[in-house]
Amino acid sequence: MVQRRTVGSFFLGIWQTRGMPEGDTIHQTARTLQRAIGGQPVVGWRSVLRPLDGVSFEGVEVASVEARGKHLLVHFDDGRTLHTHMKMDGSWHIYRPGERWQLGEHRAHAVIETPTWVAVCFDAPICELVAKGRVPEAVARLGPDLLDPDADLDEAVRRLRSEPDLPLGVAVMRQDLVSGIGNVYKSEVLFLKRLSPFARVADVDDATLRGVVDEARRLLRANLGRARRTRHRLRGDRHWVYGRSGAPCFECDGTIEMERQGDQRRSTYFCPACQGPRGSA
């Protein structure tokens, strides 16, 4: 029996995500935390971050835990919210009281103790307590969350269309346009739709943009609660192009390439034969 359950960088202790978690990982993290600490009284709180150290949670319960795109929000019944974003290095872990932690306490940006579980946020670059009635600015700016059952996908298309000069590989990663897509889904979706990541938004029509959004949502939903797989085969690679630079394309035997895009130089994997060479629509 596995006693330690780890969410975030280690997803339920089963596999490890590399790089920044994508929307499916954060949503599953929120679900796991909700099951563990949702509705539970806070019997202990601490943080190595000075703004959070010594904050009182006496008599407070965890009301709910939710994900918004790549942001994770722990809501307390007194109206306050703990807002975290994992970026490249953060992770949420849960342990039984008294159980040895996998990482050092000096890395614990937030520790929420309940009678049955201890939830620990390690190394999150964003970890802040938000006052009652406030919404974190980064969360307020988010585009439609593709894992929200009520997401307005037409609004996602409209927001993407508002940036006509952006390359598709950059636009779909902009969380203020559509939230939840990261490097893996960006590369996989654009390959599946046979679109060049270097084509501008202006180069494709609304139906094509909607197809990208729909496909991203389908893959995100399909991978909730399981090891991420976008290429559904019994054996072999889990992905069509992601992480396969220099390997043969499964569709045409051409060579998969990788280029870095945008101000953050995020990696984009693609097949020039199937999707068109760099710079093509």
Image (cartoon, grey):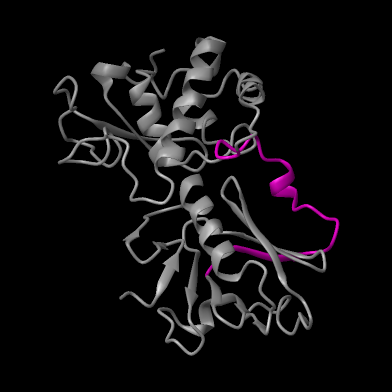
* Vertical side of 52 occupied by 68: above or below: above
Magenta span main SS:
loop
Residue at (78%, 52%) from the top-left corner?
135
Is residue 266 visible in the rendered image? The answer is: no
Q: Position of residue 231 (x, y in %)?
A: 27, 34
Tell me which corner region of the image, top left, top right, bottom left or bottom right, holds residue 61: bottom right
Q: Position of residue 46 (x, y in %)?
A: 65, 83
Q: Position of residue 99 (x, y in %)?
A: 44, 86
For residue 126: magenta? yes
Is residue 231 visible in the rendered image? The answer is: yes
Q: Is residue 44 left or right of residue 93?
A: right
Q: What stretch of residues is rendered in magenta? A: 123-148
Image quadrant for the N terminus? bottom left
Q: Is residue 16 left or right of residue 204?
A: left
For residue 102: magenta? no
* Vertical side of 211 occupied by 64: above or below: below
Residue at (48%, 19%) from the top-left corner?
211
